[in-house]
Image (cartoon, coloured by chain):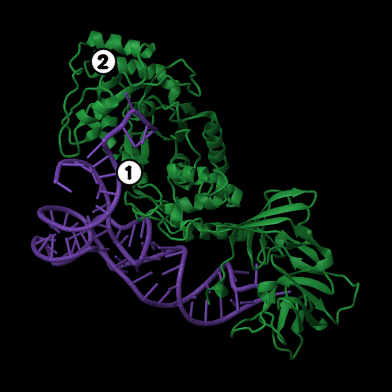
Chain colours: A green, B purple
RNA sequence: UGGGGAAUAGUCUAAUGGCAAGACAGCGGACUCUGACUCCGUUAAUCUAGGUUCGAAUCCUAGUUCCCCAGCCA
């Protein structure tokens, strides 16, 4: 590690220190998703952190562990999708795939141990009563009527819970800690609850399920996790995390460290809200390219490496923060700029006839696949008398500094000739411009400016009408919300800020012919427009998503 | 108003008692067969008030603001 690429954050400092002092000679982290939803960019922060530590430090590993302790919310589809997303992001848990449900038997035994020590009891209070007994933020709670029952009775009742002899909600197992604790998590928290539900891995073998706090610390311990990294809201669960480990006979005691979760401008990142967007049809699905899910971003065309780069750049602290989505977009552009082949495409075509160019002639102009990377090669583009240009690249009454085409004005066709607009033809009914007649200067081919002629500043993209490929659909995506902080005002539903123009579909785009054999997943830069990914090509039936536009300093003025 | 956390340019992150630095965003310019990319320049910050110290973003005291916690969710 040299000075420059030393990725430093407070957690890595702690780990470095733990290695230096000999507290640990190997490091184990874990990424612990609950399989009840799809992964989003916020999870990517945690994945990059945990797996990044495993990559960065010697003798370090990161486990993937599904935190599957709530059978009613979880299912195998999520389990599969999550693994798929992590692989796509570029990380590997090798043979260390674990499930909290694998530990159910051991967890049960630990719970029995707690009962035998007189530190856990079966409680008959129902949910409402328990809430009442718990007290409030400012008032202490009251002890459960069951908290002094005998160990024998508790063992027997817990056994019955396990055997399905009680209905859901009838009993719970609770830790006996302190009903007057200022930390509400310590007021005799629930350890096990009854759920007569089908679990995606254990089926009906278990009818009682351990709660997060109990499960998580013990799973960490069983796997020999050294540093258990989680988000800030678990900070006041740490005393409970430690309590379970301190009160059970365990070979190690992982350290929980909390960091701030990711927030991004112009988006929402809570599973609940994302689910709402899907269910209420604001987007098509979890993998809609407007979603901040990893699947959505993947479909949108975001490269995994760009997301990893982003996660490196944003840093890691305990401060609540909101990252400007422009930083993510910058990472995407930076990566795509390096790797994408250049092509030409006209999204909103207007016909141009080059009146002094011979009819029926076709010539093939040479164009480079990447202006800065000659090793990416060249290709030929057919040019003829009739072409399409972008409607935006012509203005009848251009403002100052408009470098493109206008009546009497000259512009260069990218990789081709300089043309001059001689005549504008309009629809007599609507007044809409339907066609432009231009002349070309044959001495200007391929970027040449003849001696004594003034250099033309404007350069526009084009395709030849009879030698192009239609794009059946190009989806243009924009930010999902119109305001940077959609959830900021608690009195206004964040969904009122949804951008009505977050998706527009173009059905009449014309592509350079070289795109006709593009393959699904290929990314291209359409020159002057943006980066586009191929989402379908069925014998010339072509579809694209626009991943992101190019920066456009003209649009600003 | 109980407990737990956090405060550095517009945003995010460094600086661990010794020149407040970097990225993104913004602005200006150069370059350019992409109004892209690249390059150069530039605006802009230590929550407040005291204290310790030759010296404080950093240590101490008091305050202010913001976030989290009362699921048999994670």
Number of numbered markers: 2
View extreme (right): residue: A360
Q: Earlier in the sequence, mark 2 or mark 1?
A: 2
Residue A245 in sight:
no
Percent across and percent down for residue A7 are 42, 51
Above or below for A436 versus A200: below
- Residue at left 74%, top 77%? A429
Q: Disc 2 sits on a residue from what chain?
A: A
Horizontal and vertical percent position of residue A91: 53, 40
Classify A272 as above or below A488.
above
**SS at mark 2 in the image:** helix
Lateral position of residue A394 relative to residue A287, left or right? right
Q: Residues within 10 Å of mark 2 (few under 14, many from 20)?
A: many
Q: CA distance from mark 2 to mark 1?
A: 31 Å
Residue underneath mark 2: A115
| Residue A202 appears anywhere in the view | yes
Residue A424, percent across and down? 75, 82
Against A55, is A265 above or below?
below
Q: Quadrant of residue A366?
A: bottom right
Position of residue A153 relative to residue B74, above or below, is above
Q: Nearer the viewer, residue A95 or A26?
A: A95
Q: Check the image and name the residue furthest to the front.
A: A429
Q: Residue A232 sits in which quadrant?
A: top left
Query: In the drawing, what numbered circle is on residue A345?
Result: none
Residue behind mark 1: A232
- Which secondary structure lies at badge 1? helix
Q: Residue at x 57, y 52 (%)?
A: A302
């Amino acid at each position: 590690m040299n000075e420059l690429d030393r990725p430093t954050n407070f957690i890595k400092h702690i780990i470095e220190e733990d290695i230096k002092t000999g507290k640990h000679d190997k490091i184990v982290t874990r990424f612990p998703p609950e399989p009840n939803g799809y992964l989003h960019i916020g999870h990517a922060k945690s994945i990059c952190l945990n797996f990044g530590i495993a990559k960065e430090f010697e003798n370090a590993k990161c486990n993937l562990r599904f935190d599957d302790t709530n059978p009613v919310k979880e299912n195998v589809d999520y389990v599969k999708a999550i693994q798929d997303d992590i692989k796509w992001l570029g990380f590997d848990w090798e043979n260390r795939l674990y499930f909290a449900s694998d530990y159910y038997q051991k967890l049960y035994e630990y719970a029995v141990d707690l009962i035998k020590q007189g530190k856990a009891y079966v409680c008959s209070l129902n949910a409402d009563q328990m809430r009442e007994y718990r007290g409030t933020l400012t008032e202490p709670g009251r002890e459960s009527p069951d908290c002094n029952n005998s160990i024998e009775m508790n063992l027997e009742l817990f056994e019955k819970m396990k055997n399905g002899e009680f209905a859901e909600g009838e009993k719970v197992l609770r830790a006996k800690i302190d009903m007057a604790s200022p930390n509400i998590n310590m007021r005799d928290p629930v350890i096990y609850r009854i759920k007569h539900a089908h679990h995606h891995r254990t089926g009906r073998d278990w009818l009682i399920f351990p709660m997060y706090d109990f499960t998580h610390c013990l799973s960490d311990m069983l796997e020999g996790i050294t540093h258990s990294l989680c988000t800030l809201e678990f900070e006041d669960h740490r005393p409970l995390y430690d309590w379970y480990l301190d009160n059970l006979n365990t070979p190690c005691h992982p350290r929980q460290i909390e960091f701030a979760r990711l927030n991004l401008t112009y988006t929402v990142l809570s599973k609940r809200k994302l689910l709402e967007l899907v269910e209420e049809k604001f987007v098509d699905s979890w993998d809609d390219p407007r979603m901040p899910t990893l699947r959505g971003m993947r479909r949108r065309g975001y490269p995994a490496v760009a997301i990893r780069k982003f996660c490196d750049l944003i840093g890691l602290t305990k401060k609540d923060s909101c990252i400007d989505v422009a930083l993510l977009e910058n990472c995407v552009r930076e990566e795509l700029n390096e790797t994408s082949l250049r092509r030409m495409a006209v999204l909103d075509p207007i016909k141009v006839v080059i009146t002094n160019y011979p009819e029926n002639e076709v010539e093939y102009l040479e164009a480079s696949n990447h202006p800065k990377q000659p090793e990416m090669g060249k290709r030929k583009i057919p040019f003829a008398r009739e072409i399409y240009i972008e409607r935006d690249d012509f203005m009848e009454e251009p403002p100052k500094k408009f470098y493109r085409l206008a009546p009497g004005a000259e512009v260069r066709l990218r990789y081709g000739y300089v043309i001059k607009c001689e005549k504008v033809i309009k629809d007599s009914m609507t007044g809409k411009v339907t066609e432009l007649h231009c002349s070309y200067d044959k001495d200007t081919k391929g970027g040449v400016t003849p001696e004594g002629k003034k250099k033309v500043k404007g350069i526009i993209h084009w395709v030849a009408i009879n030698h192009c490929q239609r794009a059946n659909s190009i989806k243009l995506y924009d930010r999902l919300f119109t305001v940077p902080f959609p959830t900021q005002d608690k009195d206004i539903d964040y969904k009122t800020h949804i951008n009505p123009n977050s998706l527009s579909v173009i059905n009449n785009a014309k592509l350079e012919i070289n795109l006709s054999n593009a393959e699904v997943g290929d990314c291209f830069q359409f020159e002057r427009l943006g980066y586009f990914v191929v989402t379908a090509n069925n014998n010339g039936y072509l579809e694209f998503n626009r991943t992101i536009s190019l920066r456009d300093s003209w649009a600003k003025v």
